Amino acid sequence: MCGIVGLFLKDKSLEPQLGSMLSEMLISLSDRGPDSAGIAIYGAPSGNEAKITIQAAKPEHDFRNLEAELARAIGTPVNIAVKSTHAVVRTTPDKIDEVREAIQALRPDIRIMGAGDVVEIYKEVGLPEAVVDRFGVRSMTGTHGIGHTRMATESAVTTMGAHPFSTGADQCLVHNGSLSNHNNVRRELIREGMKFETENDTEVAAAYLSSQMAHGKNLGEALEGTLSDLDGFFTFVVGTKNGFGVVRDPIACKPAVMAETDQYVAFGSEYRALTKLPGIDNAKVWEPEPATVYFWEH
Amino acid sequence: MPAINVSKATHEQDHEQSRASRVFDLAEMPLRELNQALHDLAPGSNETAWEVLHPKGSHSVAVGVDQPITIDVRGSVGYYCGGMNDGSTITVHGSAGPGVGENMMSGLITVKGDASQYAGATGRGGLLVIEGNASSRCGISMKGIDIVVHGNIGHMSAFMAQSGNLVVLGDAGDALGDSIYEARLFVRGKVESLGADCIAKEMRPEHLELLQGLLDRAGATGVKAAEFKRYGSARTLYNFNIDNADAY
């Protein structure tokens, strides 16, 4: 099953509420997937800053002194904000690769959830409500975000098997469905130089989109490619630094409903996810067509 | 059950009669209590008018009702609304999620908005009216139900449909009637493509009469049966044919 949500704000005055709106949407779909949950929030760009979201199995141990050790390793200060099992490491955009390598060298057990100028990704085993509370997602502000609650069918119930999957700067993806040709596509992407953290099918879809966009395609064109290159069941909701996209496979078994007003575009696996959004009673509500790409950019 | 109110219906404009409805507000009480109360109705009960408020996409609203009552649902519902309905008249004043009227036995379900996937799936009887559009797999494996869609229907509709009538005032998506048995499909607009073993058929007087009756019952005023084309089974898949072996 699984439940997925997405929210792309058009009205800036709603940005302070992005975290709480997206949290409510995800919690309403808890019974579509009790295994694990995750959310990606795209914060407002804050100039000369880039961030990496990291996760540790033993946060007290792994995050202790990390700020000082990283600063020493790269020769310039970094900022680390710890949130439960996750932490957001802030640096300047030109230092981001160096910081990433230093984290991996200093703390090989730490997992990188995602990185970019604006995205923060939080995911853990557990119900959506527990996960959003643990990371204080409700108080987060931002321009857009996506979320997922998982009922695992493919690969283990672990933090790393939870969605969203991020395989490129400020790019991430949530998926309802299962892919059948992911092993082949993964092999091809590995040959291209993409790196994988799991055996999960959804990570392959994320990496496929990252690879397509690295080759110069825009989000819409990359999503179009999934229709011919990925086999299986999928409804994907995708975030990029300034964009938000949706695509369903041609059979379109996996449910999807969207709502649009002057203030936002919202996606939910079911209408239940949308019922608390402002102005929903007068929103345009529709089911995205099969094999049809939808995307919005700021 | 003290939480259940018996009061005048709050939406008078939709009630021509001013009789008392039993009002069930799903914002205040659980769905399970609503369905249990509906199932507890004895034959001949005087509680024949029900109203459900704030469904907010709930699943399984008014499933398994087997008494000839009316149920007005004020808002949009999730999966399986009115499933297994046997004789009640359910009106959804909003849109319906997947599987509305699944396996209906008899009665009438009207959806004022759109319906999601597999509306009326496996239905055995009664009439399902969708006043908006229905998405994919509308009437999949229908077994005697009548379905009238005022708008369009999505792909793979009437897949393996066995009997009953599917009437579409708008257009039909890809692979209409794939592997169909004996259901009749009437489409006024264009059909994106026909599925395996589904063909256009002549409209005979008995079909026109049947169709006009369904259009009238479904409130499709001003729509003439003669505007439709009929589709049904070519009956070439009924028996195993060795020449088709490559297709399996």
Image (spheres, grey):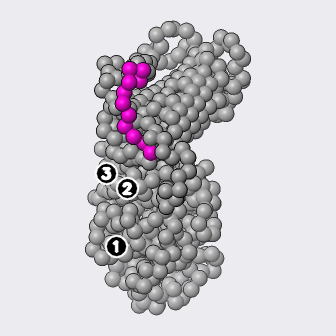
Specify the farthest residue to the top. Answer: B18
Q: Which residue is mark 2?
A: A291
* Quarter of the view holding residue A140: bottom left
| Rendered location of residue B119, percent (x, y) | 50, 37
| Rendered location of residue B52, percent (x, y) | 56, 26
Q: Which residue is mark 1?
A: A212
Label annotation for residue A10: 3
Nearer to me, A289 or B60: A289
User: Height in image: B169 above or below A265?
Assistant: above
Tell me the kind of residue under disc 2: Ala
Mark 3–mark 1 distance (CA, rounded to whole Å):
26 Å
What SS does tag 1 mark? Answer: helix
Front: mark 2 or 3: 2
Residue sitting at x 57%, y 11%: B20
Q: Are marks 3 and 1 on the same chain?
A: yes
Nearer to me, A220 or A17: A220
Q: Are marks 2 and 3 on the same chain?
A: yes
| Rendered location of residue A235, percent (x, y) | 45, 57
Q: Residues within 10 Å of mark 1 (few under 14, many from 20)?
A: some
Nearer to me, B235 or B69: B235
Residue sitting at x 63%, y 56%: A34
Q: Are marks 2 and 1 on the same chain?
A: yes
Tell me the kind of residue under disc 1: Gln
Side of A290 where A153 appears, left or right: right
Side of A296 where A133 appears, left or right: right
Q: Which residues are magenta?
A: B197-207
Q: Is residue A203 magenta?
A: no
Q: Is residue B67 visible?
A: yes
Q: Is residue B203 magenta?
A: yes
Residue sitting at x 47%, y 29%: B165
What SS does tag 2 mark? Answer: loop
* Quarter of the view holding residue B49: top right
